[in-house]
Amino acid sequence: MSSQTTTTKTTTAANPASNDPADKVAASKSHAIQAAEDLRDAATQKADELKEAARERAGTIRDLATEKAHDARLYAEEQYDRARTAADDYRQDGERYVRENPAKSVLIALGIGFIVGRVLR
């Protein structure tokens, strides 16, 4: 019987589909390790893809924000120029009125001063 047992063990060790529990555990362990490595590689690849997509999106948002800031600055400069021009026009109109109507302008100024003085008292 011992020669038959030796032959069976040799055949079992050579046969990958053996029924030996230790071989099954080793095969399962090897398969699990390979699956974990594959999963880790896939996760790493996906993380790299997501990082690259985030970088691209951040670049797009940064470019858009820069463009909007530039547009806002141009708009603000235009509005400032308009307001400055309007203020200059009002000042010039006031100066012209005072030159054309000096007595009337002095009386108006005195009247406004009197009213403001009464209100603040």
Image (cartoon, rainbow, N blue to C red):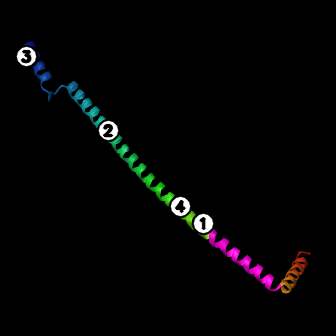
Q: Main secondary structure of the magenta part?
A: helix
In the rendered structure, which disc, 1 or 2, sits on the residue that comes first in sequence? Answer: 2
Q: Secondary structure at mark 4?
A: helix
Q: Amino acid at mark 3?
A: Gln
Q: Earlier in the sequence, mark 2 or mark 4?
A: 2
Residues under labels 2 and 4: Cα distance?
Answer: 43 Å
The residue under label 1 is: 77
Residue drawn at x 86%, y 86% is 103
Q: Counting other residues with Cα less than 10 Å from the Cα at mark 4, is it few (<14), some (14-19), or many (20 or more)? A: few
Q: Amino acid at mark 4?
A: His
Mark 1 lies on a secondary structure that is helix
- At x 39% / y 47%, what residue is drawn? 52
**What's the residue at 37%, 43% (across, down)?**
48
Residue identifier under label 2 = 41
What residue is shown with label 4? Answer: 70
Q: Is residue 90 above or below residue 14?
A: below
Tell me if 32 is positioned left or right of 78 in this view: left
> What separation in Å lies between label 1 and label 3 (alpha carbons)?
100 Å
In the picture as drawn, the residue positioned furthest to the top comes out as 2
Q: Quadrant of residue 8?
A: top left
Image position, residue 35 (x, y; %): 27, 36
Answer with the quarter of the image where residue 97 lies.
Answer: bottom right
47 displayed left or right of 20: right
Tell me residue 117's x, y (percent): 90, 77
> Dots 1 and 2: beta carbons under 8 Å?
no
Residue 83 is left or right of residue 96, and the answer is left
Given this view, does label 4 or label 3 mark the residue nearer the observer? 4
User: Which stretch appears magenta?
Assistant: 80-101
Q: Which residue is mark 3?
A: 4
